[in-house]
Each structure stands twice: as structure tokens, then as C-alpha cells.
Amino acid sequence: MKILCLLAGDKSVKSLNIVNDIVQKIDDTELFVGSFPSDPWEEDFFTKIKEISNDESITFIELRKIDKEWWDDFNSKNKIDIILAIGWRYLLPKYIIDDLLVGAFAIHDSLLPKYRGFAPTVWAIINGEKEVGATLFSINEGTDSGPIIDQISIKISEDTYISEIVEKMNHVYINLLKNNLNNIISNNFQTYIQDESKATYTCKRQPKDGLIDWQDSAKNIQNKIRALSHPYPGSFTYLKQKKLYIWESYISKSFFVSGSIPGRVIDLSKQNEVGISTGSGVIYLQKVQLENKAIVSAYDLLKSPNETLG
């Protein structure tokens, strides 16, 4: 049995360790690993994956999209039975899937069929969802549309930041792999078809999409800040034409505005926090950062009711 593991993103390193532990206990099973360099804003998963592969004598391949010429040559020499994609950002062509004896499988950061596509957890937080999760499924020609093998959900609140979810998702991935990979390798697993009537899709996000619109409601702005905080690129605004990242904040439930100018400082009475008026409600900024500067308390930068963000 030969397995090609395609890895990227913040959960790939721990997942590789689990996959390797499982594969080492199964006779006549060989693991190959493929990955590509991280984006500038990401933690460097690529170097860690390469180091683990070298330390464990796993064949490592640097690749992104898999073209037919490369695949035909690689597969003619190795006869891959299973592809396991974790954090992978590219669709697998049908000619690859058809060549596999067992199949291609992936873990996706959503409770499929909802949030198919890019950055599902980020979008779920932005949309104010109370539940997120991950799904192990069999890859077909569609976008995250293949039959489901297993799924694990996580309850979240309006105060949950993405860093906490990323840590919990690592454990979800580990459990999905521990509970199902042996059955996949032995080709003894069950699936169920996704309900297409409930399917939703997400756009790819770029760092520039983190720009805050202060005309929006405090709730929507807070969701965006939670979703894009560390380890992601961050939500941002502008202070005197300088980019200002907002890493931590909360919505006021006791400060009410009758004369609002969205983006304007409205409350300086709290230590280390600054109240900002929005299109609906007040949001208190806690940790902020001017571009290429250190993270500081909002009160260190916003000390006047004349200050307006945006």
C-alpha cells in the first residue's frame, strides 16, 4: 500500500506525525509527502513538514498543482493507492482520482456540505456561526462535494477567537485520522452522500479583505476581528493614513450612542481600552498594532475624541 499525503496549512504538521505513526504500524505501507512553501503571513509549515519527512525517511516532494505529465511519471514508478489531502489548496484532477486503487481523501475545515471552498472557519466566524468543525470525505471532481466518512463539530461563542479554534481543530484532525485512517488503508470504510440542497460555497480571501468598514454594525466588525486575528493576517483600519491592525476587542453591552460618527473615538474612560462608534453600537479596542510596530493597548495610540479611524 502506497500513500501520498498532500500537506499545507496550520494543521499539517501535527497531522503528518499522526499519519506517520499509523502508517509505521502497518506492514508493506509506504508514505510519500508533498507540500509547498508557506505564504508570507503564515507560520512556516513547509520547512517543518520537510524536516519531519527527512527525519523519518519519508520521500518528500515539493509540489503545488499536480499536472498530468508529472503525475503519469510519478505514478508509473510508485503506483499510489491512496491520496490524503490535509490543508491542500488545489483540486485533484479526475485523471489522478481514477488512477488510485482505494481513492483520494481530504479533511475540510467545515461541517460539510456547508462552507465548501476557501477559508471556511474564517467565513463561519464572520457570519456569526455558533458551531464549526471538520469533515473527512472522499474526494470527487467537485469542490469539497464528495461522500462523507466522518465529521466532528466544535461549539463556539461570540467571544471565541480563531486562535482558540485552530488549537481545537488540531485535536479534531487528530481524532478524525486516528478513528478512520486504518479503515481507509484497509479499504473498509463507509460513506454517506452530502445533501446538495444544503451546500454553500465561500470565496478565496486575501489580506486586503480584512479592511474594517466602520459603517457596519459592532457585531459584524467584532466577528471580523475574531475571524482574522492571530495566526491570520488581521483585520485593519487606518489611523492618520497609517495601517492599524486590531487584534483584540469586544462589543459594549452597556454604552449607548445617540450621536454616532462611525469610526470616531467615543469613550476614553476605560484603562487600556478605547470605545469606537460604529454603524450600530460601540466596540472597544484592546490590542492594536501600527504596521511594522509592536502590539500595544489601544489607549496608547488613541487618546483623543477627535481621532477617527478609517
Image (cartoon, rainbow, N blue to C red):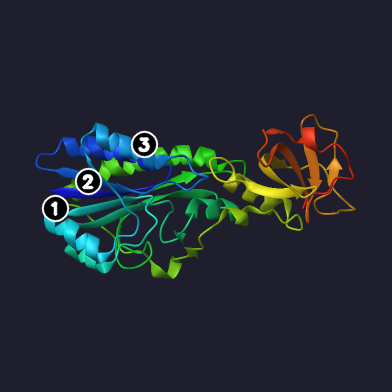
Q: Is residue 53 visible?
A: yes
Mark 2 or mark 1: which comes first in sequence? 2
Mark 3 or mark 1: which comes first in sequence? 3
Q: Position of residue 207 (x, y in %)?
A: 58, 53
Q: Quadrant of residue 297?
A: top right
What is the secondary structure assignment of the residue under circle 3?
helix
Q: Which mark is residue 113?
A: none
Q: Which mark is residue 48?
A: 3
Type of amino acid under label 2: Phe
Q: Is 169 displayed left or right of 287 in the figure? A: left
Q: Position of residue 147 (x, y in %)?
A: 30, 61
Type of amino acid under label 3: Lys
Residue at the far bottom: name it: 197
Observer-nearest of 195 and 261: 261
- Asked if disc 3 and disc 1 are in contact, CB closer than 8 Å, the reply is no
Q: CA distance from mark 2 to mark 1?
A: 10 Å
Q: Position of residue 251 (x, y in %)?
A: 72, 44
What is the secondary structure assignment of the residue under circle 2?
strand
**Neighbour tally class for label 3: few under 14, some 14-19, many 20 plus, Cα within 10 Å:** few
Q: CA distance from mark 3 to mark 2?
A: 15 Å
Q: Which mark is residue 78?
A: 1
Type of amino acid under label 1: Asn
Residue at the far left: name it: 28
Where does label 2 land, which residue?
32
**Neighbour tally class for label 1: few under 14, some 14-19, many 20 plus, Cα within 10 Å:** some
- Asked if disc 2 and disc 1 are in contact, CB closer than 8 Å, the reply is yes
What is the secondary structure assignment of the residue under circle 1?
helix
